[in-house]
Image (cartoon, rainbow, N blue to C red):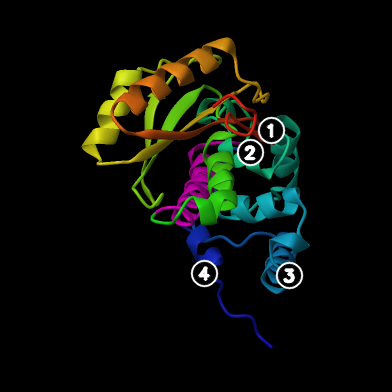
Amino acid sequence: MTRGPHFSDSQAALFDYDESRAEPIQRGGAPPSYIRDHRARLRERFLVGGADALPDYELLELVLFRAIPRRDVKPLARQLLDLFTDFNGVVSAPVTRLREVSGVGDAVVTELKIVEASAHRLARSRVMRKQVVSSWDALLDYCQTAMAHGDIEQFRILFLDRKNVLIADERQARGTVDHVPVYPREVVKRALELNASAVILVHNHPSGDPTPSQADIEMTEQIQIAAEALGITLHDHLVIGKSRELSFRAEGLL
């Protein structure tokens, strides 16, 4: 059976150079047969068995195929995984750090960041406009996807209506590697603007350890006092680490 043109094969012709060596290539030129065969086998395994059928480096190869159309991308995939630990770490890595890797240029960065943005949107779609109580695990997954691999602290607020349905998710501030400025008055003001009845605070620890600092605890107390004064409930404060999260409520801190 003759194999017809594959969508990703035709897309490869959009690139004018091979990022793995930054060499000019002939537009539309075919990759060597061993590369074509390897890519065809990987795509077939993925289509038949899904992501679980592939280890991280092969799944990453599938992403890199489109950015580097005519060279073996396995060495680059393994190099990226050595640097950033796993697939999630690679696609979530800061652009500045990705560009430091030999063989990574605009096309590779774009493909990786498309995957990251897609993962964020899919995770977010599973929790927006849903009751937090019934989608708590999905909410934790979303927070992990969106924040666990950040290299600086960021602070988000999840706003809930009277039925505890998530009506808004907003990033309020970005900080440094170990601090993010948060102003209780601004948190409460935004909740009133959205007509929210409750909020969940979320911030990440780039160190990977979700243990709250004394500053985290004091800031949470200040927000709770300000919110309660205006009839707004603080349901929880989640601290997101690299592989787990900590709940203030579960730890008895709320």
Q: Residue furthest left?
A: 193
Residue appearing at x 67%, y 49% in the figure: 60
Q: Kindly identify which numbered label has been placed on residue 90.
A: 2
Q: Position of residue 112 (x, y in %)?
A: 55, 44
Establish if 35 lies above or below 71: below
Name the quarter where the N terminus is drawn. Answer: bottom right
Query: Marks 2 and 4: which is nearer the front?
Result: 2
Residue appearing at x 41%, y 16% in the figure: 222
Q: Position of residue 82 (x, y in %)?
A: 76, 33
Query: Marks 4 and 1: which is nearer the front?
Result: 1
Compare marks 4 and 1 and give the one earlier in the sequence. Answer: 4
Residue designated by label 1: 84
Disc 4 residue type (three-letter): Phe
Estimate the spatial distance between the alpha carbons at disc 2 and disc 4, rounded to whole Å: 25 Å
Q: Are marks 2 and 1 in contact (CB under 8 Å)?
A: yes
Span of residues in magenta? 104-128
How many marks on residues?
Answer: 4
Q: Kindly identify which numbered label has been placed on residue 7.
A: 4
Estimate the spatial distance between the alpha carbons at disc 3 and disc 4, rounded to whole Å: 20 Å
Estimate the spatial distance between the alpha carbons at disc 3 and disc 1, rounded to whole Å: 25 Å
Estimate the spatial distance between the alpha carbons at disc 2 and disc 1, rounded to whole Å: 5 Å
Residue designated by label 3: 49
Query: Please, what secondary structure does the residue beneath circle 2 have?
Result: helix
Compare marks 2 and 4 and give the one earlier in the sequence. Answer: 4
Q: Position of residue 43 (x, y in %)?
A: 67, 67
Query: Please, what secondary structure does the residue beneath circle 3 have?
Result: helix
